[in-house]
Amino acid sequence: MNQILFNELLSRGEADTLDFKLKGYFVEDVSSSKKDKDNDFIKDVLALSNTIRDENAYIIIGVDDDGNKIGIAEDDFVDGAVLQSKIKDKVYPLPKLSTYPFYDEDGLKFQIIEIPVVWNQSPCLPTFTSGMIIEKGQVYLRRMTSNERANADEIVKISDWLRTLPKQAEANSKAHKKSREASGFRFDEVTIQKLFGNEAAEDEDTDRLREYYFKNDIFDKIAVDLPLRILVGHKGIGKSALFNVSMLEDKDAGRLPIKIKPGDVANLGKGTTDFSDAISSWRKGLFSLIFKKALVYFGIKKTFDIDFEDIEGQFLDALVSVLSQELEEDNINEQYLRSIERFIDNPVINVYIDDLDRGWEGTKYDITKISALLNAVRDIIGTENRKLQFKVSLRSDVYFLYRTSDESTDKTQGSVIWYKWTQHEILGLLIKRVRTFFGKDVDEGLLRSAHQADLAKNLDNIIEPIYAGQGKWENKEMYKVLLSVIRKRPRDLVKLLTLAARNADNRNSKIIMTQDMKAIFDEYSLDRIQDTINEYKSELPAIERLLFGMKPDRMTSKTSESFYYTTESLLKKINKIRERGEFFFSNGRKAYAKDLAAFLYKINFLTATKPQDDGFIERKDFEENRYLVPKFEDFGYDWEVHMAFRWGLQPSNQEFIYSKI
């Protein structure tokens, strides 16, 4: 859905394929019972599904009968899983539908229920009778603005129409045909990297990164004009990529971007035992580094005798003075003249400090180094009149140890931004990469607002659209499979598709198929386990034993509960692992079962789940519900092992995993 289509639908008015609802079906209302509301919804879906058409049908909630926009309350949106539960076991064949929120240009919120044109073996029929509203086995269709019983002739026409529609399996055939027509395309290593991106942003081609980069709302919170931003996130979530794009935009806007890498600061604070001396060393070292890198940025290779020990409050003045002197003496290469003049007119420096977790071991020295750095940064920004700004990235485990070890962290807490992605944003990111690779225009607003099924159509020429395997994924849309096996980290998606594309290329295929995904799930999953071990062993040295200890045991390996736990069964499982040896965090603190359960949740190994009364399962990861960690058992959640880890824990039983997903 986009604004143009939305306005067009409203202008059409209610018809065979369009129904307006002022309020949602399940908004509390004394005028009708819950049973009547369920029946109204089921009958509307049946009628629209069975109506002969060549375009998708829509139910738009938040619009009156005359097409006037009213909108719905923020809490009135009903999740798709809830809607599916209303028709499950009550209609056969089960109609296809999707739902999503839509915001118009005035900020009004609406709920869209979209019913696509899809093949079914027969018209959709109710499997129950409810008073005079719904009759078991009756075919309903839409006549203009009302739902009616179909007569015999209409039933024949509906059946004939359904037979003309392509079966889902044929969608993959069409995708294969598209790929064959793209005769010059193949998944070689260069193509894979340009198409899906590099796993490491620092190795990415600058022009390609700028072209395909997808900004979520975190970008603006970091790029904002504030003296200190601390970007915290898991490994592989895109911190370096964000910094690199922000630096490119600084350059375009005439701001001076300075990037400080681990090697630049390796010796700062070394040999000092007093914390105040360490802060002083960092402060002086940062001033010196920024000054030298600024001169290099402007093509100046000379050295200047500056006392960085006592330069606070005068740093930018000193830099501007040196640049002005070099201009007067005509020592500046012509290619740098314009950028120097712009800087002198508005001297703003954005300092990016990235990759500080390189070589991180979680030692007391490592933690003190981070603490001294951030204290030095706070001292600097307090004296430079907001013209010298710092943006620091920290891995989540690094930040956690710093946060729990330094009493002054409350002073930087307001500058911390947790980097997180939604699944929709990650799909939008992939679509932008694919569209730009093939030279197609990109509307980022549309990437954010369009339904995922519509976005996924952009992948049809490189990835077969329907998963053709067995188990609970059988005949599911491939984009749903992709999103379910990645954590909410762009690097997971890059890794998954890179492996699958290589497998496709080995088969001389120009399209990623189900067999390619199945062939690489083991490797992908083991990589995720190893990445997690590498990322968090500084916090819990015996993490490898803990993760592989979560492998299903003989009693549960063939049951549906093998990767699912209540809080009680999870703690029991962890205590069994602890029987083979205690666990200790890097600070020496003993880790009990609840500590380890909270740790597994924090590192995204576990997802919190809670069944709702309407049948929907609420899922929360650590970034969404960090409050679950301190009091692990207090909130009534169950737990499941994230899909990304399951093949690595049970590689010999893939078919079982597919059947219990």
Image: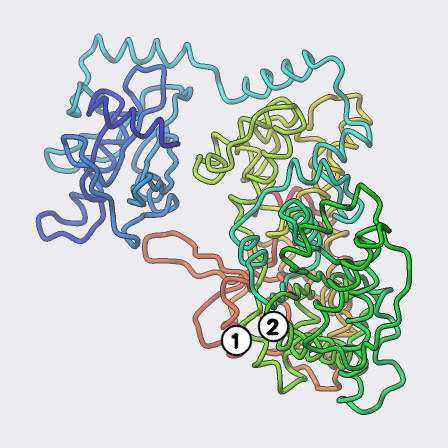
- Residue 438 locus on image (x, y percent): 66, 24
CA neighbours of label 1 inside 10 A, class few (<14), some (14 to 19), many (20+): some
- Residue 341 locus on image (x, y percent): 70, 50
Lateral position of residue 445 relative to residue 383, left or right: left
Q: Residue at x 46, y 34 (%)?
A: 446
Read off the residue under disc 1.
Answer: 632
Whichever of callouts 2 and 1 sits on the residue coming sooner in the sequence is 2
Asked if one can make out residue 54 in the rendered structure from this viewpoint, the answer is yes
- Residue 452 locus on image (x, y percent): 48, 36
Q: Nearer the viewer, residue 356 or 627?
A: 356
* Residue 138, numbered label: none
Label pair 2/1, CB-CB below 8 angstroms: yes
Q: Nearer the viewer, residue 511 or 649?
A: 511
Q: What's the residue type where badge 2 is placed?
A: Ala
Read off the residue under disc 2.
Answer: 597
- Residue 153 locus on image (x, y percent): 21, 8
Secondary structure type for disc 1:
loop
Q: Residue at x 59, y 24 (%)?
A: 440
Q: CA distance from mark 2 to mark 1?
A: 8 Å
Q: What's the residue type where badge 1 is placed?
A: Phe
Q: Nearer the viewer, residue 434 or 565?
A: 434
